[in-house]
Amino acid sequence: MTDEHTRIRVLAVDDHPLLREGIAGLIADESDMTLVAEAANGREAIEQFRAHRPDVTLMDLMMPEMNGVEATMAIRAEFPDARIVVLTTYTGDVQAARALNAGASGYLLKNSLRTQLISAIRAVHAGRKAVSADITIAMAQHAAQDALSPSEIRVLRLIAGGLSNKEIAAKLAVTEEAVKGQVKNILSKLGANDRTHAAVIGLRNGIIDA
């Protein structure tokens, strides 16, 4: 048995109790780590981190009140040595980049927790990065794509909101022809078949938020 004082101390942050129970179960099976606290949103995560100073924090990305990126930034600002692994159902590479830029040491998909969580905790505790292979591939693919301009992202967001070219033109106070030109550029840059496909790609890759 590992000595109590040398175990990796873990904080689990997720707004779904069942997921936290699953994480607790996985950690309970390991002799070299222990779950010291849980939190249901970003604000609680900061409070629990201050109270317990865990070695590794498992941070859900999408939560009410304060999301995982914001909580990660806040914790890292106060505790620069904090080691945080972001957990999400979302493969969006822009979200991955935001989390890693905010100071996260790892980024795992929730559907891979059973196979990757324990090794990720050990890797991050040892000072290494832990990023799901799926996300590494997505980030590489995104880097190869032409980035959308801020105005194209605005148009894509409105497309995802169900607006027609005419409605988008009225909302942005531009001509319908200008919108058509931007839509054409968006489809080309994203390799999309149509407007709906472009919106799906934008959401999936984290270019726009749901």
Image (cartoon, grey):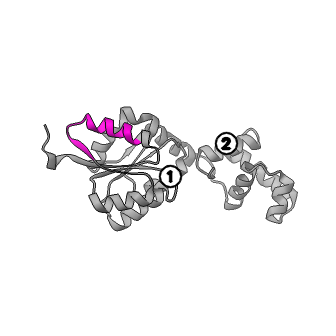
Q: Of label 2 and label 1, which has the lower sequence position?
A: 1
Outermost front residue: 17
The residue furthest top is 115
Q: Residues within 10 Å of mark 2 (few under 14, many from 20)?
A: some
Q: Which residues are magenta?
A: 20-35
Q: Residues within 10 Å of mark 1 (few under 14, many from 20)?
A: some
Residue 192 x, y percent position in the rendering:
71, 41
In this rendering, would 76 be left or right of 152? Answer: left
Residue at (74% x, 38% y) in the render: 193
Above or below, 127 against 169 in this view is above
Residue that appears at 65% across and 47% down: 202
Residue 40, x across and y down, in percent = 43, 51
Which quadrant: the N terminus? top left
Q: Is 157 situated left or right of 131 in this image?
A: right
Magenta run includes residue 30: yes
- Residue 17 is at least partly visible in this image: yes
Q: Say whether marks 2 and 1 touch (CB < 8 Å).
A: no
Pinpoint residue 140: horizontal percent, then vertical percent: 51, 44
Q: Which residue is mark 2?
A: 200
Q: Name which residue type carries label 1.
A: Met
Given the image, on which type of amino acid does mark 2 rest? Val
Q: Nearer the viewer, residue 26 or 15?
A: 15
Query: Which SS class for mark 1?
Result: loop
Residue at the image point whose x is 46% and y is 34% from the top: 111
Residue 47 vs residue 153, the one in the foreground: 47
Residue for badge 1? 63
Q: Is residue 144 left or right of residue 110?
A: right
Residue 102 is at least partly visible in this image: no
Q: Position of residue 3 (x, y in %)?
A: 12, 44
